[in-house]
Amino acid sequence: MAVQTTAVPDAPTGSGPAPADRRAEFAVLLRGTPALQHGDATQQHGDATQQHNDTAEHSDPPRRFLTSAWQHFVGEEYDPVRFATATVDFNRTWDWDWVKINPRAVYYSEAWGAVYDPDDYVGVIPRLVSPAIAGVADLATVRPLDPATNPVLAEHLTSAALIREQLPDRALLQTVFSPLSVLLQLAGLPLYPGDVVPGATVAFSADELLTSDPAATHRALAAIARTLGDYARRLVAPVAAGGAGLDGIFYAVTGTANSDLVARELFEEFSRPYDRQVLDAVGDGLVVLHTCGADSHPEWFTDDGVDALHWDQFLPGNPQLDTPFGVTVVGGANKDLFGVDGDPAEVAAQLAATLAAAPDRPFLLAPSCTVPTPADPAALRQLRDAG
């Protein structure tokens, strides 16, 4: 399958800080002080951080927002080198301040044996050939995995390390789905109300999967959480120690906070304890938490110790970005407006409204979720040059 690319006719404006400052600037914006950088195994970044500290008092005032966007690279997602190259090219082209690594959305379930067709995508999702869980009895087959030896997780550790090597100046966050999201994906179940998984023929619901044998469900979730925790530790571990050297993770609970998919009491039982295990595994690494779709309840996650919170403020049931949650927020413009048939003028208007609504608060300026593939360069340029 050929990769779908987004062209950019003109170069970035270059109005941001020197590239060497960006990782430290990202940590300072989220935490007020530089975070412990797990990836600072290279002298290059150590020198960059020292430069930032030595020159801060002589530099311009810190920016109140940092900008990014991300998309899927259909056609490049099943090769770690090609995926890393596509990610680096996209971020260098648009000169984003921070990077959400956006791998294929199904790699979590592939790690436990789900099979997808890499040559048959429906939108940005490959078609499911066979799930890892075909019935409740298969919950017993979900065991902890070693991220260093599991082919799928090792592939993504490799691509993350390659991206770090080529982007030493940017804060890098790997996308990690919550254990509950992964469990649903293992069974070929949708992660959003009303969604359809291409190729899936599931004969049971999410409720039935979770509640038919609760003990088996908890054992499977514990195995997934242990695996994802070990994976997160390797992602943020220094390169010199065998890690990928990333700054943190972009933790996605997908649409599981919507009660039309998972009832609140089931979310509390089958998501919360396992979310905590993965988040704790990140240690001093940075965490941006994303709760996706309509009725996504970002207010549920303000006490989880995350560094930033991202939700789609344009969907029903979701609050606006200026809601005082006491945590750095992420957002800015409706993701759907970034498609090739979108509206760059409306993107500009929404970005202006976002900036006007938060004149003093630091935040991360970004689309409300993954932008379409391909995206409209004019819309991306509005985001890049905002403010």
Image (cartoon, grey):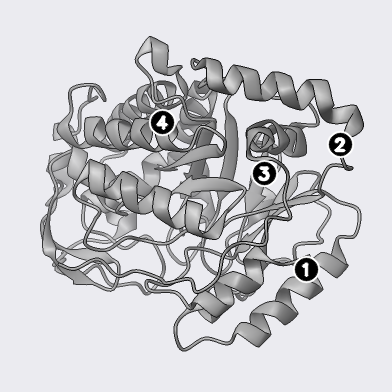
Residue at left 56%, top 79%? 378
Residue 370 or residue 181, whichever sits in front: 370
Q: Secondary structure at mark 4?
A: helix
3D distance between C-alphas at marks 3 and 2: 25 Å
Q: Which residue is mark 2?
A: 59
3D distance between C-alphas at marks 3 and 4: 25 Å
Q: Quadrant of residue 52?
A: top right
Q: Which circle, 2 or 1, is nearer the viewer?
A: 2
Residue 123 in the figure: left or right of residue 300:
left
Q: Earlier in the sequence, mark 2 or mark 1?
A: 2
Q: Which circle, 3 or 4, is nearer the viewer?
A: 4
Three-letter amino acid code of the residue under disc 1: Thr
Looking at the image, do the residues carrying marks 3 and 2 touch, with CB atoms under 8 Å apart? no
Residue 141 in the figure: left or right of residue 144:
left
3D distance between C-alphas at marks 2 and 1: 26 Å
Q: Secondary structure at mark 3?
A: strand
3D distance between C-alphas at marks 2 and 4: 27 Å
Q: Which residue is mark 4?
A: 165
Q: Which residue is mark 3?
A: 308
Residue 333 in the image: state x and y as whole percent: 64, 71
**Callout 3: few (<14), some (14-19), or many (20+) C-alpha neighbours within 10 Å?**
many
Picture quarter with the C terminus: bottom right
- Residue 354 - label: 1
Three-letter amino acid code of the residue under disc 3: Ala
- Residue 116 - label: none
Q: Secondary structure at mark 2?
A: loop
Residue 109 in the image: state x and y as whole percent: 23, 45
Residue at left 51%, top 25%? 282
